[in-house]
Image (cartoon, rainbow, N blue to C red):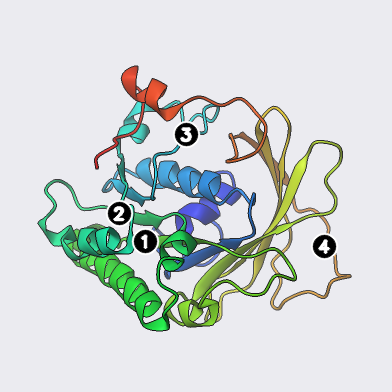
Amino acid sequence: MAEALRRVLNAGRAAGPGGDGAAGPPLLLLGAPRSAQTSLLFAAALEAAGEGRGPVLFLTRRPLQSLPLNTPAARDHWRLQKVRFQYPSSVPELLQLLASAHEAPGPVPSLLLLDGLEEYLAEDSGAQEAAYVAALLLDTAAYFSRRLGASGSCGLVVALETPKEGDGDAPHLTLLQRYFPAQCWLQPDALGLGRQHCLRASLESGQLSPRMEWSVTFLPNGEMTVTTWPTQPSKPGPDKKGPSAGSQSLTLVCDNLSGPQCSLDSILTSGTGADSKT
């Protein structure tokens, strides 16, 4: 999961349950448009790539147009080379890729990421199709975990864009939540000033794990500042604000936000980018 994403939000520190190297439960990363899901997924990929275990498999319908450029992890060519991109453009291609994962050569992935699940589900609105995609994602991660054996398990994080508030729920969200016991919600934070873009990230790992929350602020220059709040045993009310427990500063380029950007193709041609297998 979720442990790599949690370390991103805690500036590289393991936090609470699951900080012993376990991948944690499968996670849904949920947020409205412009909620930086792709940026956070990629940051989690770089975090996992630095663990020294298997590579990271990053699935998305189309190549990324920009990468986080100013973090130490993003400048680490070794980490970038361990992120393997695949671009299934349709549900049949996605299912075929997952079904044939056991045939893929090379090291076993330690983290499986899927960006833009809502785009795949838009092709077929049936609940049966959504359940099949979710089940195959879980089966693939479980297969990778068995292959990894004593060296650890394979995490699974899936990003699902939700409609804006008041526009209804994401397709089959209730069904998907049964497959993914952990969820991280990204919500707009009204505290943003000027051109700052602020989000509230709320992580619920399921079972008995406490809820964790962060305030994530993207500055115009692409810097991402994360402020953690004390652990909450239950969902706080709308008027409940916790004092800051500390902050860490990272520099990321958020998808669809202002800030320094660079084409992925230019990075690949310079020999410093991530693998772009198709």
Query: Residue 184's spot in the image, x, y percent?
Result: 58, 64
Mark 4–mark 2 distance (CA, rounded to whole Å): 34 Å
Mark 1–mark 4 distance (CA, rounded to whole Å): 30 Å
| Residue picked out by circle 4 | 242
Residues at marks 2 and 1 touching, judged by CB atoms closer than 8 Å: yes
Query: Residue 190's spot in the image, x, y percent?
Result: 84, 54
- Relative to 16, 65 lies left or right: left
Query: Which numbered disc covers residue 155?
Result: 1
Front position in the image: 43 or 121: 121
Query: Residue 273's spot in the image, x, y percent?
Result: 36, 28
Q: Secondary structure at mark 4?
A: loop
| Residue picked out by circle 3 | 65
Residue 182, placed above or below residue 117: below
- Relative to 84, 172 lies left or right: right
Residue 60, placed above or below residue 76: below
N-term mark: 4 or 2:
2
Q: Secondary structure at mark 3?
A: loop
User: Hey, what amino acid is under mark 2?
Assistant: Ser
| Residue picked out by circle 2 | 110
Mark 3–mark 4 distance (CA, rounded to whole Å): 37 Å
User: Hey, what amino acid is under mark 3?
Assistant: Gln
N-term mark: 1 or 3:
3
